[in-house]
Image: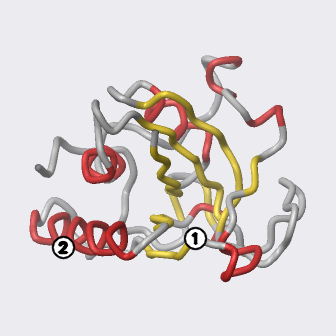
Amino acid sequence: MREIILAGGCFWGLEELLRAQPGVTDTECGYCGGTVANPTYQNHDGHAEAVAITYDETKTNFRQLLNFFFQIHDPTTLNRQGNDIGASYRSTIFYANADELRVARDFIEIVNASKRWAKPVVTTLEPLGAEHGAAGKFWPAEAYHQDYLQKHPNGYTCHRMYCNSYI
């Protein structure tokens, strides 16, 4: 099993769409990329609302998950998805190693080259790891955020299918 951490607006909708992807075995909402240790919904300065996705490498991979990620949110809006505005809702790929960084950079080039968006991708690439302090760690969100749209099927989401596959 491997893990990828992505942010692209409110974590509820992102989690709901990603959980249904082939090979995804688990999802968890949380915070990543900010300065606060042990962030909460009320205090997550600099952190993005993110989703940790655990996946089976025999059924999917990092690149395929990025392909889907770029289909379900607008990667060209800075610090915004739908009605959600602010750095918490930025588009970010959190990478764990040089290979993930390379694949993420390459995929952003694919998305930009596709010309499906009128503006260029603003998705940031942010490192994971203890050497990056609070910013480099995924912090699970409160229990009431987990599986939110499973518990509240008519709840708010800013995510939808914007386009078809890039690969």
Mark 2 element type: helix
Where is residue 144? Give x, y as percent.
Answer: 82, 32
Q: Comparing marks 2 and 1, which lies closer to the viewer?
A: 1
Q: Is residue 144 left or right of residue 17?
A: right
Q: Quadrant of residue 130?
A: bottom right
Where is residue 3? Give x, y as percent.
Answer: 49, 48
Q: Quadrant of residue 112?
A: bottom left
Q: Residue at x 64, y 64 (%)?
A: 48
Q: Residue at x 43, y 31 (%)?
A: 24
Q: Is residue 117 left or right of residue 149?
A: left
The residue wearing badge 1 is: 128
Q: How is the image coloured?
A: secondary structure
Above or below, comparing residue 50 to residue 98 in the picture? above
The residue wearing badge 2 is: 109
Q: If you read the primary sequence from the N terminus, does the residue marked by circle 2 or circle 1 appear first? A: 2
Mark 1 element type: loop
Where is residue 107? Give x, y as percent.
Answer: 23, 65
Crowd tier of the residue under label 1, counting other residues whose Cα lies within 10 Å: few below 14, some 14–19, many 20 or above? many
Q: Which amino acid, by three-letter code, is at mark 1?
A: Leu
Between marks 2 and 1, how big is the CA–CA gap? 22 Å
Q: Is residue 167 left or right of residue 56?
A: left
Above or below, comparing residue 127 to residue 144 in the picture? below
Where is residue 73? Give x, y as percent.
Answer: 39, 51
Crowd tier of the residue under label 2, counting other residues whose Cα lies within 10 Å: few below 14, some 14–19, many 20 or above? few
Above or below, comparing residue 66 to residue 158 in the picture? below
Q: Residue at x 58, y 70 (%)?
A: 128
Q: Residue at x 41, y 71 (%)?
A: 123
